[in-house]
Amino acid sequence: MMPEVLVILTHPIGSLLADIFTDRTADGVVFCCYCREAAHRGKLLRDLRTAAGQPPVPAEERDERTRLLAQECVIQHQLGNHAVALAAAIRWRAIVQGRGYHTYTLRQGQAPYPWGVVVAFSELDAERLEANVERAEAIVQAERDKVMDVFGWGVQQ
């Protein structure tokens, strides 16, 4: 079963989800999110606002909370709960780091996910936004090609 929301980490390139919870990569993090319905995108954005609006974590608890949120993010993503995983990353960004995030609504998504949004830990200019969307589209297409090849529907040589 396909998830309602597909979340792809597009920057830093080649990073794993656990990697984003380090200070050296935190500002450059970009996620491209694709939703099966407009309502899913609306719920995702509301859930992210709720996650960011929680009370800040005291300084003495930040390391432990970072570890727990990183673990939650990775596990939920592996389970296919991409929106929950992204909310864990946003909670870390907002309540542990005390920093904000930016969202950019996409005019189109990737079939079968026609609704899209980009979530970034720092503001993106048009060029960086486009590069991340292109990277996500390439990842989606590569996964689509793998599935088609498994069923013998792809290009055969």
Image (spheres, rainbow, N blue to C red):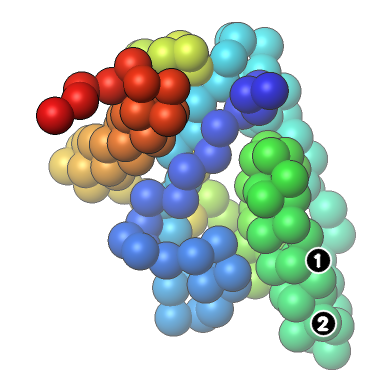
Q: Amino acid at mark 1?
A: Pro
Q: Position of residue 21 (x, y in %)?
A: 59, 72
Q: Quadrant of residue 151?
A: top left
Q: Secondary structure at mark 1?
A: loop
Q: Position of residue 135 (x, y in %)?
A: 27, 42
Q: Position of residue 129 (x, y in %)?
A: 28, 40
Q: Residue furthest bottom?
A: 60
Q: Which residue is mark 1?
A: 56
Query: Which mark's residue is nearer the viewer, 1 or 2?
Result: 2
Q: Could you tell me which residue is drawn at 50 percent across and 33 percent down?
A: 33
Q: Amino acid at mark 2?
A: Glu
Residue 129 in the image: above or below residue 114: below
- Number of the label disc, if any, that sits on residue 19: none
Which badge, 1 or 2, is on the more N-terminal residue? 1
Q: Are marks 1 and 2 in contact (CB under 8 Å)?
A: no
Residue 92 in the image: above or below residue 113: below
Q: Could you tell me which residue is drawn at 45 percent across and 51 percent down?
A: 9
Q: Could you tell me which residue is drawn at 56 percent across and 21 percent down?
A: 35
Q: Position of residue 25 (x, y in %)?
A: 43, 73
